[in-house]
Image (tube, coloured by chain):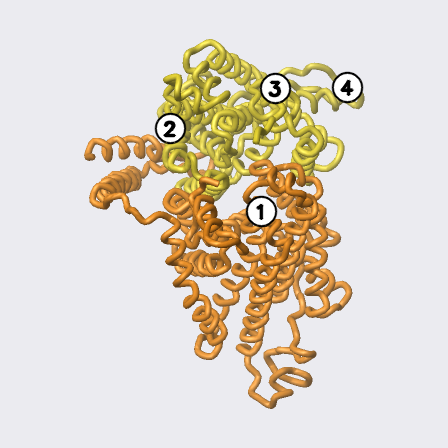
Amino acid sequence: MLRDAFLSALVALGLFGAMIGLKTDVGATALTLTPRPLAVAVAVGLVFVGRLALLAWKKARPPHATGPGALARRMARIGHFVAPLLLAFAVALPLFAGRYWLDMGILVLTYVMLGWGLNIVVGLAGLLDLGYVAFYAVGAYAYALLSTQLGLGFWTCLPLAGILAAFWGMLLGFPVLRLRGDYLAIVTLAFGEIIRVVLLNWVSLTGGPNGISGIPRPTLFGLTFTAGGGEGSFADFFGIEPSVSHRVIFLYYVILGLALLTNWVSLRLRRLPLGRAWEALREDEVACRSLGINVTVTKLTAFAIGAAFGGFAGAFFATRQAFVSPESFTFIESAVVLAIVVLGGLGSQLGVALAALVMIGGSEVFRDLAEYRMLIFGAALVVMMVVRPRGLVSGRAPSVALGSRKRIAAEMVTEGRG
Amino acid sequence: MAYALQQLINGVTLGMIYGLIAVGYTMVYGIIGMINFAHGDVFMVGAFLSLISLVALSALGISSVPLALAITLILAAAIAGLYGWTIERVAYRPLRGSFRLAPLISAIGMSIVLQNFVQVSQGARAKPMPALIPGGWTLMRGEGGFAVQLSWMQIAVVVTTLVILAGFTWLVTRTPLGRAMRACEQDLKMASLLGIATDRTISLTFVIGAMLAAVAGLMFLLYYGVIDFFIGFIAGVKAFTAAVLGGVGSLPGAVLGGLAIGLIETFWSAYFSVQYKDVAAFSILVLVLIFMPTGLLGRADVEKV
């Protein structure tokens, strides 16, 4: 055990010796080197202790007998209680939470919505999409441009943004129909980058790197939420003291409503023949074809509907920030949303919500660590895959199943044998 | 004409760098069928290791450029190989036999880790480096006094790449390790039944891929003279495009694909617009996958049910 840990420390010394030990700095004339032996010693020591602890823990803990199936069942049972509680908490949050927590709630709910939207594509239809942020961007820019150029309101633009994003989803869907698995992932990634580069360089339309600012805020049946109150504002109409928090609370309920809409639609879709076709497609495309399922239509609808929800979320993002720029739509965003879906267990609605809470909330907690935050995020992704590749809540059992014999088959699938 | 010739030279140099990275993708994909998403970042780590080594060597007083480059090449390749080994061991091996998306997501996580590790340890600022091999050779003078330059740097990049690739081809076709690698590529399970240490072969594949990426990193550093922690992402996607264009699993295809991507990118930047050069490369990826999914030299992937 000691020998193993010592070897790990030796490898760590090799890895970190140059990278951490010798920091290059841009000097006056040439690059200079700053040696940092202490940092290397700390890093190597951490690896040594960490490896020792891991080995000791593995030794102390016998391999547990409860399979992923048992755990999934337990989670499903808990889920019956957790989901309504979580919903009640979400609805009641503005009653007692301050500005900071509400802003955080809005952020988490935006990711919950994105997660549920991507869940349709990845979790249900099994199409790995690494460019989901493209549809988010399409929605955001659609609202930003329609409102600032044509003066349309938020509620008019919201469906338009969704439709536009769905249209782009179809456009992406057509060429990638024949691709599968990893290839699909890379093409969608490339698509996401293409959209971002175009947004960055089409200065006359999108403002390039400066983005679009001054995007109007949403209204409640024509009532505005200006901070100073005044004619036609929410505070004026109800005769209450004008306050900034009204707008935040309003935005919070808007995104809560949108997220719940996403959830409701995907839960209903799962029970339609279309939803069942998605789940069948995820399990086995060849079997789908031979059973006469139209794979083209099935894939395209998954892309389009998933993209539409991304577009809705994008429009909301634009109106909340009142500013959009290509900065917000990098590959990392796609990776975060994908991580939420995977962590949530690919297909489980509750899992996605919990995962968004953990990931976004967690990364807000780590905000003080600034540059270490993404490092921890990446490491968490790897550790998560190694420890629980099926996510927190493994919900791969089909939405509609016949009797108990099918249950067993689904469990085999859950274990990755399908 | 002179202008086009100059672009041809530049494109070939760039293509060689992409080809070196693409070989790493194609080898790993051939053997375990996964896209090693972190490979582009290993290339970036290799570039940084080269930079650190070059600066350290000059601080130690080694003024001979060829000697410094040779030591750097070996050091960077060795340490990057260690990175490749560790990544496979930590992030991919525990996931072998897991569900299809797990290794890819783990690889994305690893890519984020590497990027941010370099950002934290070396700082976010771009690192410039003076040209080590200055000067060149004027091939011809075109109309309007446009001189076609073939710099020593470009010759060095192309020659080094060709030598490394020749050595690598020898390794794959003539040595026991290469035979084991090819056997694993054809059928992993059968190879292990026949007594090939598959785990070790896969590890070594990652090590070799990472070493080639580190060489590409050194070339990139020499050629462009400036690196930052983000170069791995774009270069990685382009090299992957090159691997796909050449036919995933085919080693000569990877180099050919790299050359094609390098040339397309250079000519696109020269004649159309520099801003959209990444879009050009990505569009080619999409077009190739739609119309020619097996690539230039790849085999058709027959699926048995």
Which mark's residue is nearer the viewer, 4 or 2? 2
Tag 3 subunit = B
Identify which residue is drawn at 66% across, 40% down: A176
Identify which residue is drawn at 59% across, 29% down: B303
Identify which residue is drawn at 39% across, 31% down: B83
Identify which residue is drawn at 43% across, 35% down: B97
The mark nearer the N terminus, 3 or 2, is 2
Q: Are marks 4 and 2 on the same chain?
A: yes
**Which residue in the structure is indicated by mark 3?**
B151
Element carrying mark 4: loop
Contact, CB < 8 Å: mark 3 with mark 4? no
The mark nearer the N terminus, 4 or 2, is 2
Image coordinates of residue A234 in percent, x first then y, are: 62, 82
Chain A shade = orange
- Identify the disc placed on residue B82: 2
Which mark's residue is nearer the viewer, 4 or 1? 1
Quadrant placement of the C terminus of chain B = top right
